[in-house]
Amino acid sequence: MTRLLKNAQSMIAVLFFAACTSAEFVDPNETLRNQTAVQSATVIYSSQENLTFAEWSFRADAPIEDVEILERKDGTWVQVDAAASLYDRFPACSARPGTRCLRHVVRGDARQEYQLAHPTFGVLRRSATLRQVAARTIDLTAAFALGNASLEMAVTPNARLLAARAYEWTIFAISSTEDCRADNFATSLVWKPVADTSVSVARTDRGLFCHGVRARDQRDESAQIVVAVVEMAPEVRDVSRTFSPEVRDDPLVVKVIHDENATPAGCARMRTAIDATLDAIPHTRLPTIGLSGAVCAMTDSRTFDANSVAYEMVAALENLGTANDEKTGVLLYASNVSYGAPQSEMLAARSAIDANRGMHGALWLVVPQTAIGVGFPRSMRADETVFWIGDVVETAAALRERLEEKLPTVTQRWGNTVPVPLLGEELTGVDGKFVKLCTSVPQVSVTATLHQVPVSAASPPTFTVAGIARVREPKRSFVPTTVRYALQVCDRYCDHAAPPTYLYRWNQDRRCFR
């Protein structure tokens, strides 16, 4: 303190001299004063360790070897005994790389107001600490994380404030969390320095371990050992799958009605060309109807029995596929002239087919463009119309292209009634384990509870997704709808906390372990 008073008197004389002269005064120690400016000041009391820890950080080039620590007692600043500090006075600042630190650590709750003084510069700027610094526990036990291969220790920010080499730790397997007590730490255990941050451990059935941390200078029987349970992380497998409901071919029946007007040879050529185009698609062909007769001459009495034709087509469709299939009966009318046709009969046959559950009647026209509005009113809506171009070859080619584009059709049943299997046949050895649905596209329906599903080979778990049935879509351009989803299978330690946060247990949370 005598040196400090002399230094203060010298500084007053210098200031007085500077005030009485007009010359500009340059402080030769300004650079050193800036170097010794305090960057941070911290005081922590750990009730767990019963230690008071005070630390100041400086620039890496700060000349702090002669800095003295003062504490306020009974209203007076008193120099502390540097030798009373338990650990190094000038350790490396692990919390602030590239800086120097001054540290003072003593036993007990010694939280006081502190400040620093330098023999040359006096009290250092920003070195004062408040008396009301909150008590905090330096929780070393929370700084450990156990993976499936080794125990790794990551020192927490609070723990870094302490001298790492002043602590040591150990670990041993336990069968119950109740076995993790301080009095179970035998003297035969191998204690490791905190700086040695990993050790290989053997996996156990329970995956539970007890580890403890103690100060090196507390090795007697009454030493306080901080203990905590460490759990092996859940052992999981990530699985990505896709599922597509069955796509079924729709049964197809075709019946052709010929109504051409030409010479017998020309008529036969037209009919042969039209019939041959149907070979381009898979279907069941029913016997054709020739309204213009063998001589291929149109009369006003051209007609057919709509009920008989509908009955024939429905009977053929019933014998194809299954009761759940979508079935189509196509009535194809072909004519090379714009002349009246049995419109009402064709519409009646189509309606009669539509009246059957799961069946669809379709009317296709192969007629001259002039027939629309003349032979066929515009109000008569055919399902498909191919114009008779004039040349039978070109007309047959246009029909073939339209047939291949539109027929046959397929149906993919979809909806909440379609179960999506969680696991495929390629996953073995999961019977009796647990599986969790992580993500799915489309989203899983809200009725599903899939955060912990037991796997049973006898009754494999499924879930449902909201979808739309796709009915009678052209097979040529059809792209199946699929659901893509990610799963996680837990093989072991499913009731343990999951990294990276360890805030929830795998079997108690919907989230997957990443």
Image (cartoon, grey):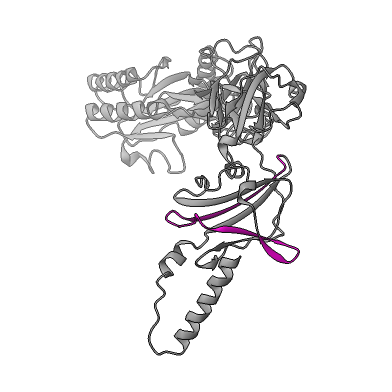
Looking at the figure, which quarter contains the C terminus?
top right
Name the one closer to the observer, 294 or 145. Answer: 145
Q: Is residue 115 left or right of 485 when viewed as pictured?
A: right
Please tell me which residue is depicted at 71% across the width and 60% down the height of the picture: 131
How many numbered circles are shown? 0
Query: Does residue 353 appear in this view?
Result: no
Q: Is residue 114 left or right of residue 30?
A: right
Position of residue 338 measured from the top left corner of the image (x, y, whole percent): 33, 37
- Asked whether residue 65 is drawn in magenta, I would say yes
Magenta stretch prevailing secondary structure: strand
To which quarter of the image does residue 387 belong?
Answer: top left
User: In which quadrant of the rendered view does residue 464 lie?
Assistant: top right
Image-quadrant location for residue 451:
top right
Q: In the rendered view, tell whether residue 332 sits above or below residue 203.
A: below
Asked if one can make out residue 111 in the rendered structure from this viewpoint, the answer is yes
Q: In percent of the image, x 31 and y 26: which residue is there?
A: 400
- Give x and y (percent) for residue 59: 45, 56
Pick the quarter of the image with the N terminus: bottom right
Report the span colored magenta. 49-78
477 inside magenta stretch = no
